[in-house]
Image: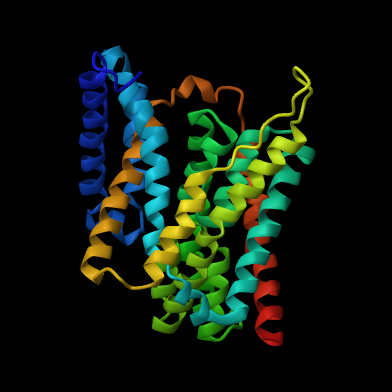
Amino acid sequence: MPFSKENRVSTLNGILFVALFSTSAMFIADYPFLKSLAISPLIVGILIGVFYANTLRSKLPEEWAPGIIFSTKTLLRTAIVFYGFRLTFQNIADVGLSGILVSVIMVTTTFIIGYFTGTKIFKFDKDTTILISAGSSICGAAAVLATEPVINAKPYKSVIAVSTVVIFGTLSMFLYPLAYKAGYIPFSASEMGLYIGGTIHEVAHVVGAGSAIGELTAKNAVIVKMLRVMLIAPFLIILSILIARTGEKIKDKKRVKITIPWFAVFFIFVAGFNSLNLLPAGVVNGINSLDTFLLTMAMTALGMETNVSKFKGVGLKPVYIASVLYVWLILGGYFVTKLIYQIS
C-alpha cells in the first residue's frame, strides 16, 4: 500500500517530487511569450514530465514511483471534482437555449464522428481514439485526463491525445479571429461567441480567441465552453455504462460490473454548490488556482510515466483522426451555430 507505515515517506517524496516539477511548469507558463500563445501550465507540465521520463527517469528511487502514480490517479480525480468551482448553473441561463443546444450537439457529434473515424476507417487503437475524441469534443487536456481512468488507458495514449489538442487548439486560437476580421465568418459578435465556445478545444484557447475579437464574443464563448466542460460528468457516466455493456462477457456466470466514475458525479455537485454563491469570490479564485496546480501535477506525473519508445508504430493516425474532427468542428460547428441561432 502506498501510504502504509513503511511506504508513506517514500510515497510523499514522490508526490513532492512531482509538485516541484509542477511549480516549475507554473512559472514557465507565466512567461509573457507562452501566455500570449495561451499555453497553459498543464501543457508545460506534461512536456517537462515527458522530457524527464526519457532522460533521468531511471535515476528516480523506485520507492518514489507510487507517489507519481498517486498523482496520475487520485490527485487527477480530485482536481476534476474541484474543476466544478469554475462553473455555475447561472452560466447556463446566461446563454440560454441556443448555448445549451450548440454545446450538446457539438460534443455529441464530435465524439461520435471521432470514434467512428478512428476505429472503423483508420482501424486505430480504441482507447487512444476515445481520448482524442473526448479532448476534441469537450475541453481538451482536462477531458483527456478525466476520460483516462474511466477507460483505464495507458499514460502514453493520453499524451498522444493531449498533443493533438495542443496542435489544433492553438491553431484555432489564431485562425478564428483572423478569419472573422477578414470577413470570412459572417457572424455577429454574439454568434461568434457561440461558435468559438462550441468548437475550440481548450478553455485557454477559447479565452484567447474570444478576447481577440471583443468583450461580448469572449463572454459568450467562455460560457458556452464551460457548458461543454459541464458535459464531462454525463459523458463519463454514459461512457462507463457503454464500455461495461459492450464489453460484457460471461465470466463465472457474472456480467462485467458497471463502474460509475463518482468523481464526475461529485463534479456536478461542486458546480451546484458553487451556483449558490456561498463562498466569497476570493476563496473560489484560490480554489481554482489550487485546482490548476493539481491538474498540472497530474499532467506532469502523466508525462513522467511516458516513454517515447511507446510511440513507435503509432504513426500519423492520431493526427488524421484529429484532423477529421477539426474539419468537422470548423465546418459542422459553423452550420450548427447558424441554425441554432436562427431558430432560437
Residue 7 located left or right of residue 235: left
Residue closer to the observer: 170 or 258:
258
Q: Is residue 85 above or below residue 290?
A: below
Residue closer to the observer: 6 or 154:
6
Q: Quadrant of the N terminus?
A: top left
- Does residue 25 appear anywhere in the picture? yes
Q: Is residue 297 above or below residue 139?
A: above
Quadrant of the rendered image containing residue 65: top left
Residue 138 horizontal/vertical position (percent): 56, 56
Residue 49 horizontal/vertical position (percent): 34, 32
Residue 121 horizontal/vertical position (percent): 78, 40
Q: Is residue 76 above or below residue 167?
A: above
Q: Quadrant of the C terminus?
A: bottom right
Q: Is residue 7 above or below residue 208?
A: above
Q: How many numbered marks appear? A: 0
Residue closer to the observer: 166 or 68:
68
Residue depicted at 30% across the width and 54% down the height: 34
Residue depicted at 76% across the width and 30% down the height: 248
Residue 317 located left or right of residue 149: right
Residue closer to the observer: 182 or 95:
95
Rendering colour mode: rainbow
Residue 47 located left or right of residue 145: left
Residue depicted at 39% across the width and 65% down the height: 273
- Does residue 185 appear anywhere in the picture? no
Residue 245 horizontal/vertical position (percent): 75, 37
Residue depicted at 20% across the width and 35% down the height: 20
